[in-house]
Amino acid sequence: MAGGYELLKSGGDGEVQSPKSYRTARRIAIGLVACLALVTLSFLHIHPPLSVDLGAQDNHDGDSVKACASPAPPAARPPAPINPWASLTIEQTVQIQKWLEEPAQALNLTRGAISKPSDNHIFLIEAYYPPKASVLRYFSSLSSSDIPEKYARVTIHHGSAPEPVIKDYLVGPLPIGSSTRMEHLTDIYHLDAIPHNARGFDTRDWTTPEIFEKMAAPLMEAYEELLGGTPQGTLITAGSGPFSFDGSFRRLWLSWRRSTPGFFLHPLNLYQYIDLSGTDPSQWDQLKIVYNHQVFNSPEAFMEAFHNGSLKRVPVIDPDTDLSYSTRKRIGAQRDLDHLPGPRSVSFAGLRFRVDHDLQYVSWMGWGLYLGFDRDMGLSLWDINFRGERIVYELKPQEALAQYAGNDPFQATTAWLDRYFGMGQSVRDMLPGYDCPHEAVYLPATTYSVNGLSTQQRAICIFEHDSGRPLSRHLGFEENEFGAVKGYELVIRSIATVGKFMITFDYIFHLDGTIEVRISASGYLQAGYYDNTQGQYGNRIWETSMGSLHDHVINYKVDLDVAGTANSLLKTTLSQESVTQPWFEEDWGDEVIQQVVTREYIDDENDALLKFPTNFQGGYAIVNQEETNKWGTSRGYAIHPGYSPIHNTVVGSKRLMKNANWARYNLAVSRRKETEPSSSSMWNFNLPGSPPVDFHKFFDGENITQEDLVAWVNLGMHHLPQSEDAPNTRTNTATSSFFLTPLNYFDHDVSIESTNAVLLKNPEKPGNPFTYDDYGVEPAHCLPEQPSPFEYHPAKMFDLDGRPAPASSIEDMRKASELYHRIKLEL
Ligand SMILES: [Cu+2]
């Protein structure tokens, strides 16, 4: 129907519809909508399942309604037959593991699961991304001789070395063969070797018997009387971080909590500062105990005060106290009509996005991209093309900071960098129908840990949805003025839960060439112990619990390629001017105050550590000065702030001295280098004084005009928790986003290409309905498949020989998921 307009269905060729036939058509339309709604509601999953009313299968013409096409996505057509950023397969990983264990490599390795801190063991094996130049060469030739060589990154804890150390290696080329070599990977770090005291997160540290014997055993009597429980019973503890400043020590605060559902919201008032430095647990010790703001330098001194009556105590909560406020179990009266399932999105004409499950390639409405996934940060997007041009080479989260405040030793010293814990490793299957719509397509991800390999079948979900608002519209009366383009969006999502708090990573693709990068947070707070000295650090959320003030800042690497790789940083400023013009009227005076835009290119990298201007008067864009649109303007992509475009409030804290300098800005732009692949590393958390990646070192005065540039963009929120953060923070306000959006990149808005659009034409006679053109894309109608019953499975585990491992116990699943936010100390 393109190029013309279509009369309403019952109208004859070229005839204007009569009011009567219009009413009939309207009745049919309303009936159809009601029927669709009924069909939709009838097949939603409720208990017990509704029986299918076969009468609902008849449409108004009496014809039976056909079953909808399967919601499987059509096959994709990736630009190349490989994904250069694909994760290693289990077989490839096992092959590397075995090669590393060969005597020829002389690494003296102990298998991770049985190793001690004083052993050498492999911490991580995963794919190492190929150089950009080699990928672009291959993509332009598609010659198999240009396929980039595959390498693995291997992290080894050298616990048995005289000076224990952590090293990263490149192993390749892969597959393992006679040319495979192992080489110390140093050129991407600002440290030659990582101090062993800053080693990667390892749950086994918390099951070492010395922890119990040295830290807990001397205090048993006090736990029972002051906290109302024992470590073997109703108490658990949790560790803080960072552990170290420069790797010379490894110390952290333990905070005790009630072991109850939502234990994160049940802090007690006792803290122990413990020293876990070195590889010999017999040397570990506790350095301080703080109870109710009283400080003791040894367990003996604390226990003496406990016994001699000098300890100022806080009342113990009655053991029968109702603690259910911290559970997710529904409470309260059911709301009106809430016994009905809500609306469900159905692609009645079949899915409109393509997925290559094996290559992890996705395309939709002119967009095409590859997916990657790693242990540190999870999902990443690569080679994002739109309408045949690469827009972004790499879009990847880098680090997630959360810095707390309080007047207890735990909250005041907490500055998490969650990459340490492995945000990709913390991804678990999504809850179908809740985390993603019923018809979402899921992709798996596999990550390595010392305990084996773990595959999540639903690590990533992809779905198209109706945003519920038009992307553009206008009401007008000239020919071809009146109409709307539907606001469909493609969402690619993954959810990482690091211990207590979860982040939903969303990449939302729009029809106009915009990519929206959004995070949403939920989960439990890291609550503090509430007393009347805590007011300036948060809000009370329960009898003895408070939500502690903190900032979240999440950094992204955005390697935009705007009309090629030669790009510049454009700064736009909106300000005010006073001007006079000879033609200004005398009655208003000859001066006018108005807005004016100024544009400048930032040429020096050192000037590219950026904050958004006050009142967002201006902004930043990556443009190609040598490529213009039809109007002579340099083609660009703007980095447009969305929800909550914040940076870290705190500057100069010793716990974030140099390891997260990116968090000081809204964004920064540096010249792209293979030696600067990331703004952080998993070890940055515990090395704030001498981080392996010191972001400020990227900015060394280089010229950034018409170079390949990377924008490092922050999302986040100032989180002042309130009583409504219990039981869990809500994603509606705990959200942040930015947009990558065309800025004079095209000659016009390309979403006008969409045929999921309507164009109206004036009625020929007053009172007649408007006629319209829907470009032949009419609402589809069919009987959707019944949604699958809800089901949820634990991760599939494989041992380091690649064999399926026995199912994990709940306690093991908890350790892998809750990390040291819940340490169950047992003898
Ligand atoms: Cu928060």
Image (tube, rainbow, N blue to C red):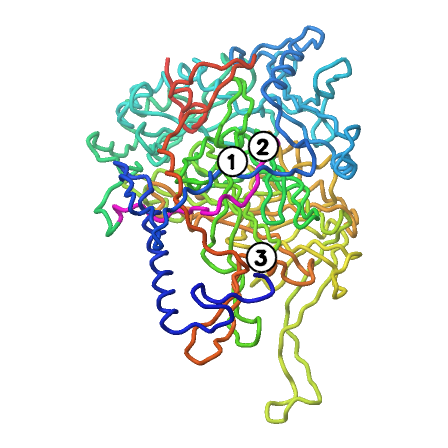
**Label ID, residue 373:** 2
Q: Would you call the spot at circle 1 few (<14 residues within 10 Å), some (14-19), or many (20 or more)? A: many
Q: Nearer the viewer, residue 307 or 372?
A: 372
Q: Residue at x 54, y 54 (%)?
A: 642
Q: Is residue 356 magenta?
A: yes
The amino acid type, in three-letter code, at marker 1 is: Ile
Outermost residue toward the top? 103
Asked if disc 1 and disc 2 are in contact, CB closer than 8 Å, the reply is yes
Task: Answer with the quadrant where ligand 1 appears in the image.
Answer: top left
Query: Amino acid under label 3?
Result: Ser
Magenta span of residues: 338-359
Residue in view at x 54 percent, y 31 percent:
424
Report the predominant secondary structure element of the magenta stretch: loop
Task: Give left or right: position of 361 versus 635.
Answer: left
Q: The residue tagged with tag 1: helix, strand or loop?
A: strand
Please tell me the numbered disc located at residue 754: 3
Q: Considering only order in the chain, which callout, 2 or 3, is on the residue closer to the N terminus? A: 2
Q: Which quadrant of the view contains residue 612?
A: bottom right
> Magenta segment: does it hold 715?
no
Q: Which residue is mark 1?
A: 460
Residue lying at 24% horizontally and 33% vertically, measured from the top left: 317
Q: Is residue 121 above or below residue 626?
A: above
Q: Which mark is residue 778?
A: none
Distance of label 1 from label 2 (alpha carbons): 10 Å
Query: Where does the image place residue 810, in percent across and percent down from the top left?
Result: 38, 21
Q: Earlier in the sequence, mark 1 or mark 2?
A: 2
Number of residues whose C-alpha sits closer than 10 Å to that of mark 2, classed few (under 14), some (14–19) or many (20 or more): many
Dot 2 falls on a residue whose secondary structure is: strand
